[in-house]
Image (cartoon, rainbow, N blue to C red):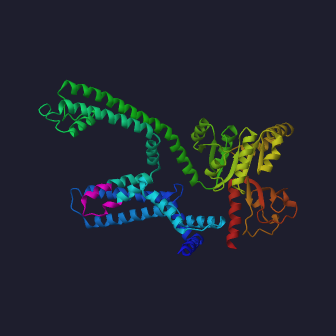
């Protein structure tokens, strides 16, 4: 028996079909960042609301067989959902394997019953959790002959909490403020108890107040009064009763004011988390995007250029005001510490981010960002700003692919402008004048292009009204070969052509190279 359970656990652990299906089930039920979960949540919300709608319809209408069938199908789906949540809540096989290997390591006798007991306890923890109980209560109305169970259909409304993050956050307010709310509830209960007791003592005796015959009537009157509803069906007639009424009304205002203050304060604090979670969810949906750490003047100009290239951008900064300014530019922005590896991982470094640009004015901050990003992703392109030239070597060692020395660039541009003003103006006008629309673009030679193995001069750039500036030699440590038209240069895979020309011409050349590829 023991050996069979251990063998079965190892078999399931090594089964790709089993583990993949369990991962899929966990993602679809629990993982808010899973791209298909929103469709599942939408279907479940529709199912919940439609079954509640059927309940309302059947109050004053005859039962329809098809609606009964629909209800049974819904119950079946709810039951499968609950079983799925029970299944993914914990892994029995991992518990067995962990305990078994620990026993082997410590040379102790392994007890499979102990492992199963632990696993069973974990499942029980799930079963008695509040949301699991709500799920079970929502399934109970499947027994249609007992109509009293149909009231449990309303528990299905609570199931919607599972599928809406905003409602989950709102519910968390009551969890976070439970001490304040418990205290307020206890004080309110004491006031109601004293009020109902006093009114019952003075007006409960027979012949005093014909509306208060039992203690429950007194409690009902006290609760209605303190809630400031005041139906008027029970009215105090003695001076003592009227005095207690005044006390309850005043306490009622205080209770409403305090409870409103507690909830609104907590909601205001929670709104930041809700906004942050929403941005994080949007980030999870991004693919091939650029992360810019630090929002300043350079970042603003860089974002404008990247948007022209239709790049997806995520701005990260610690300053809330800068985040708001970035959002004003319709750019996705999130407040956070980019030197924190956990935060970098959360925003997609190591997953779908292709480039990270560190633009902090502090070299130490940039160095931390480079180290963290490179540790998470060996292939990500890292660009960083450097303020002190002595730090450049450290940034390269840390893994930066390209370093921007703003002081050096400024000096170089000023020197070129003074030394060759005409040439500088020409290049400046050609590249930065939007009316001319000239672009410098790069064309990577991909694997299946038949141009591989041919001389670069076999491409007629003049035919496309383009000028070849140079080529990045992929086989020679990415050396830049300037204007190789008068030499024989054999193109290789991953070489990059640097070409200048108009956008349409660049598109034409790219499409021609790809068309040649498709023909072959």
> x, y (%) of residue 81?
43, 62
Q: Which secondary structure dominates the residues rendered in magenta?
A: helix
User: Does 307 appear above or below 180?
Assistant: below
**Image coordinates for residue 295, horizontal then vertical, percent:** 65, 40
Residue 148: in magenta span? yes
Q: Nearer the viewer, residue 402 or 192?
A: 192
Q: Residue at x 78, y 63 (%)?
A: 460
| 243 or 374, nearer to the observer | 243
- Residue 378: x, y in percent? 72, 57
Q: In the image, is 131 to the left or to the right of 510?
A: left
Q: Which residues are magenta?
A: 139-153
Residue 184 visible in image? yes
Residue 331 visible to the viewer: no
Q: From the viewer's perspective, tell me whether residue 306 is left or right of residue 1.
A: right
Quarter where residue 135 is shown: bottom left
Q: Residue at x 54, y 55 (%)?
A: 33
Residue 39: x, y in percent? 46, 59
Say how many tags the image has: 0
Quarter of the image containing the C terminus?
A: bottom right
Q: From this viewpoint, which residue is outermost toward the left?
A: 207
Within the magenta stretch, is there residue 280?
A: no
**Residue ID at (35%, 63%):** 75
């Amino acid at each position: 028996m023991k050996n069979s359970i251990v063998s079965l656990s190892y078999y399931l652990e090594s089964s790709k079909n089993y583990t993949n299906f369990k991962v899929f089930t966990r993602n679809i039920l629990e993982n808010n960042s899973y791209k298909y979960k929103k469709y599942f949540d939408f279907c479940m919300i529709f199912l919940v609301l439609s079954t509640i709608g059927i309940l309302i319809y059947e109050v004053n209408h005859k039962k329809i067989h098809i609606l009964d069938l629909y209800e049974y199908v819904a119950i079946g789906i709810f039951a499968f959902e609950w079983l799925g949540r029970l299944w993914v809540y914990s892994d029995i096989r991992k518990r067995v394997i962990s305990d078994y290997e620990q026993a082997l390591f410590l040379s102790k006798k392994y007890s499979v019953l102990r492992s199963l007991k632990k696993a069973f306890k974990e499942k029980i923890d799930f079963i008695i959790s509040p949301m699991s109980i709500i799920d079970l209560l929502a399934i109970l109305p499947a027994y249609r002959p007992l109509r009293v169970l149909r009231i449990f259909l309303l528990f299905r409304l609570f199931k919607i909490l599972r599928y809406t993050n905003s409602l989950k956050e709102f519910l968390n307010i009551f969890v976070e403020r439970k001490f304040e709310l418990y205290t307020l509830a206890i004080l309110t209960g004491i006031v109601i108890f004293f009020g109902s007791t006093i009114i019952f003592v003075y007006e409960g005796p027979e012949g005093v107040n014909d509306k208060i015959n039992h203690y429950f009537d007194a409690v009902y009157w006290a609760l209605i009064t303190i809630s400031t509803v005041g139906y008027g069906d029970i009215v105090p007639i003695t001076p003592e009763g009227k005095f207690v009424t005044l006390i309850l009304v005043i306490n009622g205002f205080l209770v409403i004011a305090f409870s409103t203050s507690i909830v609104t304060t907590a909601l205001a604090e929670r709104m930041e988390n809700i906004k942050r979670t929403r941005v994080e969810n949007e980030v999870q949906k991004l693919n091939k995007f650029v992360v810019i750490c630090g929002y300043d003047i350079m970042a603003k100009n860089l974002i404008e250029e990247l948007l022209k290239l239709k790049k997806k951008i995520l701005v990260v900064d610690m300053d809330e005001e800068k985040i708001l300014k970035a959002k004003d530019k319709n750019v996705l922005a999130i407040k956070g510490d980019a030197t924190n590896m956990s935060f970098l991982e959360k925003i997609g470094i190591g997953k779908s981010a292709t480039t990270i640009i560190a633009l902090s004015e502090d070299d130490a901050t940039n160095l931390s960002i480079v180290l963290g990003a490179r540790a998470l992703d060996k292939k990500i392109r890292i660009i960083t700003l450097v303020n002190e030239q002595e730090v450049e070597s450290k940034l390269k060692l840390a893994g930066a692919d390209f370093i921007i020395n703003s002081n050096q660039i400024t000096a170089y541009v000023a020197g070129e402008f003074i030394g060759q003003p005409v040439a500088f103006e020409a290049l400046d006008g050609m590249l930065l004048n939007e009316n001319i629309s000239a672009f410098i673009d790069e064309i990577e030679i991909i694997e299946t292009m038949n141009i591989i193995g041919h001389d670069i001069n076999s491409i007629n750039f003049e035919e496309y009204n383009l000028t070849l500036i140079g080529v990045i030699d992929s086989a020679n440590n990415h050396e830049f070969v300037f204007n190789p038209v008068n030499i024989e240069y054999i193109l290789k895979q991953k070489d990059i052509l640097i070409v200048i020309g108009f956008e349409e011409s660049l598109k034409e050349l790219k499409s021609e190279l790809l068309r040649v590829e498709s023909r072959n």
